[in-house]
Amino acid sequence: PVCVLARLATAPGELGAMWTLASDTALAAAYLRRLGYGEAEALALATGRPLQKDKAQAKGLLSGLVRRHVFRIPFENLEQHAAPAGATRESEDSASSPTAIEERLERLGRPRSIVERMVSGLGGGICFDLNLAFAWLLRALGASARLVMACVAQEEGFMSSATHVVVIVDTADGPVLVDPGFGDPPRSAVSVTGQTVDAVGTYEVADAEEGAPDGFPKILRCQRNACRHIHDLDDTALDDSQLQAWSTMYAFQLDGDLACDAEELREGLRAVLTPGETIFSEKRFICIGLPKGHLVLSETRMRRIEDGREVESVVVQGPEDWEKLASKVLSHPLVSEMPADTDVERPQKKAQVHSPRAGGSVAQAREAFQSRTGSGSHRTFGSIDNKSIAVGGAGQGGGLGLNAPSYGAKVQHWTGSGVCRRAVEIADDVRTAWQRVMDDADPLSWIYCAYSADGKVLELTSSGDGGLSDFKAAMGEGLAWGGFRCYGVDKRGHLECKRPKLIFVQHKPAGVPFMKKAKQGPHKGDVKEVIVGAHMDIIVESMEDLEEEALISKLQGAAGAHKPNGYEFDAGRVIEADFYGLGIGRACRSENARNDN
């Protein structure tokens, strides 16, 4: 039962007592194992103190540790509700036993015991558990980690007292903020200068403005792709309420270095545990991070949020049902794989994910994959599966087949009710126009679709029969989707054969802000249900991506063994593409061509 799991993770017992006999190195290795590291890698990190020896590379490892913490150790308040604030551990009328609050306050002075609890169970805790334990681990790995207090922002202003604790790590490039114990945490180490981007948001440390509490000179701001809204987990209207603009998460002290049992921490924890003071005393919750969102359980339902949308919702039917759902959430880290590291920093150039170009061989792709995964302790970072290493497609009927029309599972987005829910609405005339493009007998050869003013509907903005040149001329400066028809042309001997090729286009100009581009990605599944049957997908960031030679290279790569020896992008103009060097037309030396010479 969940109550037993919670007790293992929150109360001292035989298992916790056994850990007191272990060395700090062994405990750090066990902690790393819970974060998903393999046995050998955990031991190497625990004994190597990498954050002390290589401070120049510290931020990358810090971000990986934060991300693993968010994905594998839940943010939850089960202990607070398993033992009410005024109750004792043994009995409510036992004068000799400490109350739950007293025990929690006393535990602050024993940070190692907090780590022992973390290692021994499936549970997690709140910031006074998670961040204190994480600071202990970072110090065990050689980091200079400091604890500072923070005042959490509300809809209007800030909380009246500091109820959050944050970890600051001093690196060779300056201090960075790490905070896996926040209700809606960054998934990376956040630099105090510039912007830091992870899978769910962009983060920035700024000077506190008027209205911030005294003694807290810095604020952490964010612009999210997904919002957890810990103060009201069940309100679906809040899922995208903070996705458009920058919002303040909290004000914090940058230069402090508090002891674990400092009076500031004790007062902050006391406020969190006191009934009626904060949301933590009102109801139970469990939250665990996902690569593009989160999985949460409140008193009334379990919700899975991805890309800012609810994709699963299960209503709690009673106490037993709640425990089953809690077990599912707590067990999730044990049955899921760690995603690749994805955070980037600005103002540096944005990180790019490289995949083999169309036309490259599977052997080349495998070499690139092995070069990323074969280096020592980082061999599991950024790993991909076989589905990720090929971009070629069926083309003329051969090849890998991954871009063949209708290849792959149909993409749908589901709510908990089982009703299909789209990420973006698509106007009916888009489907009608594309059906015409698919008809080789219809002169319409391309469509271009842009977003409505509110960004919620994809509308047909232009279409035509003029070929690629007209399609390029119609392209705007904002995010859009579209497609066009061209032809693969075979001239072999006396024969000439033209086969239509449909190209699916995702237009995201280089000048569009990064966050807007990130929000376009989840729409692809819905758009491809309307712009169907494409032989090849391309992303267009500049007009260079639509140059004919570049398109021919990709189309030839998507073809099988039988490749056309020419392509027609505009009516009447065929560009030769003699891939095998066999000649074209009457000069073709193909075994299937009969030349009259």
Image: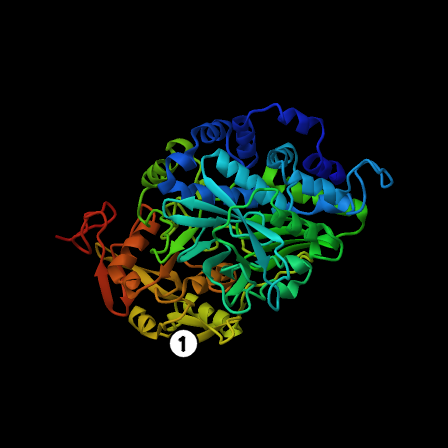
Quadrant of the image occupied by residue 227: bottom right
Q: Where is residue 430 in the image (x, y as percent from the top left)?
A: 48, 71
Q: Position of residue 264 (x, y in %)?
A: 61, 50
Answer with left or right where residue 263 lies relative to residue 40.
right
Q: In which quarter of the image is the N terminus?
A: top right
Front in this rendered view, residue 106 or 575: 106
Local secondary structure at mark 1: strand
- Residue 524 seen: yes
- Residue 382 seen: no
Label tally = 1
Front in this rendered view, residue 590 or 267: 267
**Hey, which residue is sitting farthest right in the picture?**
93
Q: Position of residue 32 (x, y in %)?
A: 53, 34
From the image, tell me which residue sits under label 1.
462
Q: Is residue 26 above or below residue 580?
A: above
The residue shown at (52%, 62%) is 526
The residue shown at (52%, 69%) is 210
